[in-house]
Image (cartoon, rainbow, N blue to C red):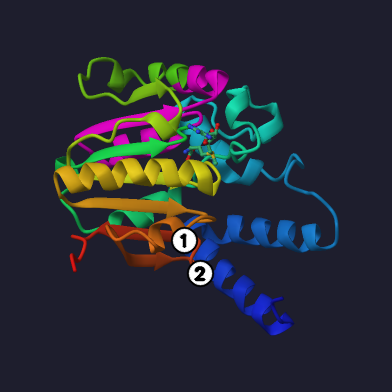
Amino acid sequence: MKSVRGELLYYKNQFQWWLEYEGLHMGLLRSVTKVASLLGQDLSSHRWFPQNMERRFDQIMGIETATLAQEENLDLDPVRKGQSSCYEPTSAPQFRHVMSELNIAISDFTFVDFGAGKGKALLLAYELGFKKIIGVELSKSLHQIALENISKIPQLAELSNRPVCLYQDAAIFEIPDEQAVLYFFNPFNDEVMRAVVSRIEFSLAENFRQVFVVYNAPKHRCVFDESAYFRLADSKFNDRWLVFESTPPICN
Ligand SMILES: C[S@@+](CC[C@H](N)C(=O)[O-])C[C@H]1O[C@@H](n2cnc3c(N)ncnc32)[C@H](O)[C@@H]1O
């Protein structure tokens, strides 16, 4: 259990982060909401709390990604029920910050979002200039919303390399044989994660190359920690985001 001092230090760090990347207004709103939730009150749906500021992103882009959905309300394949997380969009400032620190030539890399939801990370990846952008999503309704969201961005209509959304189980997605940034926002449990990671390892064994895993809310980080093909390269926001980089496995 965390000590009170540990908790306070954690929130101090969080507040600094909110302040730096989301501004004073959102920093204060998030703090008030956090304190209220500790007191058993849910303020996040109050009209003055613009659904965790994600709605601002949606308003600017003319899309809808902010509304959350619990796992039980997602139309997932029955085989995967109980193995998935809820739907929640990626925070734009956090994503931009972590990606900018990768220090890579983004236009040489393919971006894959495992559990792409309504396509928010795909649009953020487009903004950064990835060579190719692919989203894999198992919920049919979320997949449809992602397609609609992408179709609402006029600049994307003309492009041959506009984000591609696949309605598919991430566990059977074939890893592109390219330099890549593979993004996970706590999409599924360790069983599915292990299936995905075996595919990544198999692909690296066939053709070793630079692959980054960006893992947001890394609940099953042990799958990467235990992999001979990855090393932890970076950690942001109190381990809320981890970056793993491919490394050639040591043969005995
Ligand atoms: C936390 S949301 C992340 C949404 C999106 N990546 C974003 O950042 O905006 C996790 C998503 O993973 C999806 N998911 C869960 N299990 C999956 C699976 N086996 N294959 C593909 N998608 C899955 C869920 O439906 C949900 O949309």
* Mark 2 vs 1: CB contact within 8 A: no
Q: Position of residue 182 (x, y in %)?
A: 33, 44
Q: Which numbered dot is residue 222? A: 1
Question: Considering the numbered disc 1 on the image, is that residue within a helix, a strand or a loop?
Answer: helix
Amino acid on which disc 1 is placed: Cys
| Residue designated by label 2 | 238
Amino acid on which disc 2 is placed: Asn
In the rendered view of the protein, which quadrant contains the N terminus?
bottom right
Q: Position of residue 144 (x, y in %)?
A: 50, 17
At 20% across and 19% down in the image, what residue appears? 160
At 27% across and 57% down in the image, what residue appears? 229
Question: Considering the numbered disc 2 on the image, is that residue within a helix, a strand or a loop?
Answer: loop
In the figure, 185 relative to 150: above or below? below
Q: CA distance from mark 2 to mark 1?
A: 16 Å
In magenta stretch: residue 136: yes
In the rendered view of the protein, which quadrant contains the C terminus?
bottom left
The one of 186 and 231 positioned closer to us in this rendering: 231
Count of all numbered marks drawn on residues in the image: 2
Q: Which residues are magenta?
A: 117-146
